Image: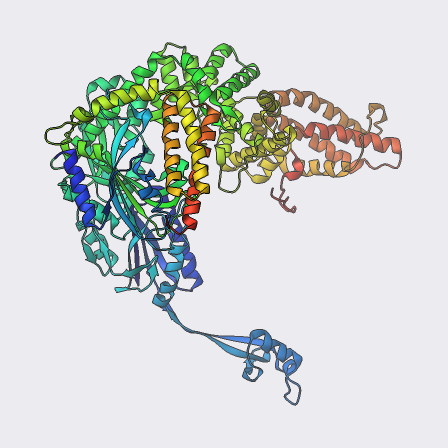
Amino acid sequence: MEFLLEINVEEMPSSHVKTALLDLKEKFARELSAAKISWTELRTFSTCRRLVVLADLAEGREAREEIITGPPRAVAFTADGTPTPAALGFARSRGIDIANLEIIKTEKGEYVGFKKTEKGRSAEEILNGIIPQIVGALSFPKMMRWGEGQFRFSRPIRNVLCLLGERPLSFEIGGVSAGDTTFGHKIRSPRRITVKSFREYRDALKENMVIVDAEEREKSILDQIEALLSPLEAQLHPDPGLLERLANDVEYPFVFMGGFPERYLDLPLEILSTAMREGQKLFSVVKAKKQIPCFLGVADAPSDAKGFIQKGNERVLKARLEDARFFWEHDLKTGLKKRAPALKHVLFQEKLGSYDDKTQRLKKIVSYLNAKVEDGKDGKEVLLAAELCKADLVTDMVREFPSLQGRVGGLYAKAEGLSSVVSRAIYEHYRPVSLDDDSPETQGGAILSIADKLDSIVGAVGIGVQTTGSSDPFGLRRNAQGVCKIILDWKMNFSFQRLLEKVLTVYGDRLKRPKKEILEFCHDFFLGRLRYICEREGYRYDLINAALGAGVDNIYYAYLRVKALDTLKASSQFEPFILMAKRVNNILAGQPVYAFSPDLLAEKPERDLFSTFSIVKENVVPMFAKGDFSQAQKMVFRLQPCLNDFFDRVLVMAKENKLRKNRLSLLQAIRKILIPMADYAQVVVEGEKPAVKK
Amino acid sequence: MSLQNLIMNLQKYWADQGCYLAPSYDVEVGAGTMTPDTFFRVLDKRPWKVAYVQPSRRPTDGRYGENPNRVQKHHQFQVIIKPSPADIQKLYIDGLTSLGINLQDHDLRFDEDDWESPTIGAWGVGWSVMLDGLEITQFTYFQQAGGLDVFPIPVEITYGLERLEMFLEEKDNIYDLKWSEDVSYRDLRFEDERQFSEYNFNQASIKSLQESFALAEKEAGRLIEKNLLLPAYDMCLKCSHVFNLLDARGAISVTERVKMIAQIRTVVNQVAMKYANTEGKL
């Protein structure tokens, strides 16, 4: 039987629509299964004003009879037919009267028991009960009430259509009764429409200027864009987020093209496209990566026959571009250097001071980092970038378009004639904004970005900001992931602990939380972020735990160790070696450190082990230093046969003290070169009990 | 069409919907939301319908009369209806039609835009209403005011009168608008903008402003003690405007900004709390 639900709302944000659909689908599937109503083809559709669920449902569930058996007859009753405690207990536990127990004949003999009947229920009855619950349980980042109702939702619910078969269901959501009618487009065709099926619903809506399938709207937008742009041999300046949002925000998309005076083309593409996107949600149009004086917009309309929509948008855009050009020219009259002192008046965080305070810190962190990276020849210029990177916060352009922070500073630095090292570093220093965004392309940008993010993180941690569950105040997680990503992309190789200590020193006595606490928190926090990045890339959790268990002070090396274990995990030497390493660990557990003397090596296998170990050690130490963990791992595999031999033929726990201590000491030396590779105890080997997942 | 025609049409339309037409409030405010006809009335439980024109001052938006879109004083047409009716979007749309706009030829959109004013502890959920890409209205379902949950839920419709008139007259420059058939916006407002921009940015005495802020804040506290909530609230509005002027003068340091906003919020919340406790008996 066809089931159709449409919740009519006032315009919902596209992010809310997206999560509501996923939630609806999941909750319907769960509730229907729980009610034992079988279903197929659970689908959802939407516009910003409609949430739609479509499914094919069974008509209900049949009445069912179930036989519940208890103890054998012989146990349940005495010879004279008196119920025993076993029978009484069974009846009590099932909540039935002893008199209702029957004798049930089974293949195994006679038992006491009873027949339990479950009533049949129609899908209609069940749905009337579960739909208000499901819809009422939808949750949104920000919820509201309206009118005099207590119901909370993303936006006010104004109509509910719900059909099962051809009949409307009867329930209420937020004070609105379900029925068999919906409404057409709120401007183009706001009439009431009665429908009997999804097919009728979809077709009637289309006639009344509503396309209820988001994919169909998106495709229509793309087709119209293509038809407009291909004669010009031009393309959209890509903006997938905007496309998705527009496909949600309109019920009947019409793409129109407009133009603007060529004199605004002097403005950089970033500024032009932002001026178009923010406010009016227009696409900028490029040809050979250069803006041309055109834009595309998506209207919620069948056409723009009189050209009013185009003309109106052109007028608004012209005013915005005029403003942008004014800001550009006006801002450039005062260089970034002259502007920077005004950052004293811009608050970064109440307890962490102004952006000028932040700038002074950034300079110190950047010079520390410059000395740590391999090729720090641009040091002075990156320092200048640090000094100027926040100055664009006091420009009119960033006040108007806050999303352009950083990029505007970079563009101004370039226009002022500062070197490309300086302008690129400023331009890129907010990147990456997420793990899917690119890291800065220049080393200066990478250093500045790390410094900026670490300053924010350490500061926030230092004043006691916490992250819990899904909330990420101060963007702590996002920033920490950004730092890790840059370090990995740029293969940066330095002690993270010392960098953190440097940032703490730079903060001086501004942070009230004890330094030790801040460092510990940051260490665990970054460890968590690095683990998340590795998991996201699909590495095995036990290999991640093992590799990171060897320490994360050098973030890049820690990541390389994960990769090394991953590369070698399939080799035939891997598992035997892991088991051997675990054996070494176990035997050394609780032993104090002993002195080693080659002269005390009594037997051949231990002499062999020692000489192989000496060679391996000599080789792996430089490999560790270079971060070549794959090679190092392969090298330590060579210990395997000798270790085997050693354990097979030599009694480690020899009675004679001297010998025993010397043998343990040899193993201790071996463990010492294994430790920098991985905490092998964490690796799960087939057949073994899995280690506890952290 | 002229601005005064637009005002008269909106007044007629919303009066027909049962709104009381309030006179503009006579203390400087940054937005229609801040006048007592909105601030107090959304806090109590009684039904309320009001519409009014409110001159709104934003000193930092001054451009000496040189910018075709920005002015340090503009005019809002404010509508509050409590509880929000189920057909409020339709009422709003019909209102635009009554101004002579044939919406079939245009693109009217409700764009996600939640409103928030930390200074008066208020927030709501709603949209910017865009007409062919031009923002003409803020449409908000209030959820909190003065730091308190409001109930029943009021809906607030705030038209930007100059914006809407620019749309109706198809003008690119605010000063080219007609206030009446014979009087232009330039005639009435240009000199105002020029002189007030000079005052806001360069001439306002920082010392006197700082003193007025301190005085008004102190006075607000004293009046709250005496249960004189309306005058106390006027004092809060004065603080807010003086703060905006000091801001335009570039005279507010980072720490002062935080402190002053907190000071205003504290007294506003005290007024709201006391008013809510009296169950709306002013």
Looking at the picture, tell me which residue is in the foreground, A39 or B25: B25
- Residue A694: name its quadrant: top right
Q: Could you tell me if residue A406 is visible in this image?
A: no
Query: Would residue A476 be found to the left or right of residue B54 on screen?
Result: right
Q: Position of residue A289 (x, y in %)?
A: 29, 22
Looking at the picture, tell me which residue is in the foreground, A333 or A214: A333
Q: Residue at x 22, y 35 (%)?
A: B161
Q: Which residue is situated farthest in the front direction here?
A: B226
On screen, residue A676 above or below B97: above
Q: Could you tell me if residue B19 is visible in this image?
A: yes
Query: Would residue A394 be found to the left or right of residue B89 on screen?
Result: right
Q: Position of residue A132 (x, y in %)?
A: 37, 59
Q: Which residue is situated farthest in the right direction here?
A: A656
Looking at the picture, tell me which residue is in the foreground, A387 or A589: A387
Q: Which residue is situated farthest in the bottom direction here?
A: A80
For the N terminus of chain A, the image quarter is: bottom left
Q: Residue at x 16, y 25 (%)?
A: B176
Looking at the picture, tell me which residue is in the foreground, B172 or B76: B76
Q: How many numbered marks are there?
A: 0
Q: Position of residue B86 (x, y in %)?
A: 27, 53
On screen, residue A41 above or below A343: below
Q: Position of residue A205 (x, y in %)?
A: 21, 51
- Residue A666: name its quadrant: top right
